[in-house]
Amino acid sequence: MDHVELEPQYDDVGLLMLKEYLSITKPGIIVGNLISVLAGYFLAAKSEPVTLSLLLFTMLAVALVIASGCVINNIFDRDIDFKMSRTQNRTMVQGGIKVDHAFLYALVMLLAGTGLLYKMANPLSAVMVLLGYVFYVFFYTMWYKRTSVYGTLVGSVSGAIPPLVGYLAVTNYISFEAVLLFSLFCLWQMPHSYAIAMFRMQDYEEAGIPVLPVVKGIQRARQHMMAYVVAFSLVAFGLYAFGHTGYEYLAVAALSCFAWSKVTFRSMDESNYIQWSKSVFKTSLLVVMAFSSVLGLELIPLSVL
């Protein structure tokens, strides 16, 4: 009888632990990156044969590697997260999961993800996803994020790797088209990340993280964001100009870049910078979803269906 009464409690504890292990993988970041993987995969699918199984294995593999990186990020950012009201209740800060257990969890996902890409796609895509992992974990999380105003730039490199992995999983070679794709997502990351840093400036100040809006001020950050949106637009049109995309892509790119530019080039000062930066951030999400969607609709071959 006692066993029967206690069993639901054990179930509750197990469910709670499952939620905690899931939370330190940052599911929102995983989903966002998988959208960009689709963009790269669909772009490559224009000229190379693909299968649904390759797409699914690629998505799963990248998700595992990103999850691993996020777990490591949670481990090393415990001291920073403790200082910010937004993050001070995270699982690793509160000791909900032991550090050695979290490391093992991250290692298993890293090995599984890279092994899956190596086996089901190709070695080049596996090497590339490992390179992105190194940039995110070692150069960004452990080094530049804490010490340099250029941390966002370093982070943008790792953030642009997932679409490149999606592309390489299909092609198994780096082309000029792949370079444009990588550049596009690098440039997209910058205003997107600066917008987050701007409307969360107080958190970053409290934690001592030297992001551009904190170190150089919001007007300097706005200037950088405008420049990056312009550069993003040029590269976006470059994909069409060099014959890698069609008219559908051109139309969506034109509308998306115009909308993002319009929001970013609006006037901004101390009285409205939070609202302004949130608008830039939200528009950036719509832009990346629009690009990924049109590449899928325009370029996905019938053989994948």
Image (cartoon, grey):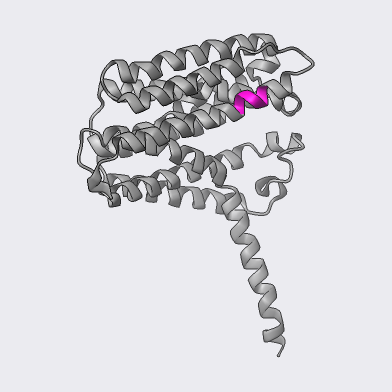
Front position in the image: 276 or 109: 276
Q: Residue at x 63, y 16 (%)?
A: 212
Q: Position of residue 14 (x, y in %)?
A: 62, 67
Residue 127 visible in the shown view: no
Front position in the image: 91 or 221: 221
Left or right of 206? Residue 257 is left
Q: Position of residue 147 (x, y in %)?
A: 61, 20
Left or right of 124? Residue 210 is right
Q: Residue at x 60, y 30 (%)?
A: 282
On screen, 198 above or below 64? above
On screen, 144 above or below 92? above
The magenta span reads: 277-281
**Residue 146, quarter of the rendered image:** top right
Front position in the image: 180 or 18: 180
Residue 178 visible in the shown view: yes
Name of the residue lying farthest toward the right: 271
Q: Position of residue 240 (x, y in %)?
A: 32, 19
Q: Residue at x 64, y 27 (%)?
A: 196
Q: Main secondary structure of the magenta part?
A: helix
Q: Position of residue 180 (x, y in %)?
A: 34, 20
Left or right of 272? Residue 22 is left
Name of the residue lying farthest toward the bottom: 1
**Residue 210, quarter of the rendered image:** top right
On screen, 257 above or below 168? above
Q: Where's the N terminus, which quadrant?
A: bottom right
**Residue 35, quarter of the rendered image:** top left
Task: Specify whether residue 106 is painted magenta.
Answer: no
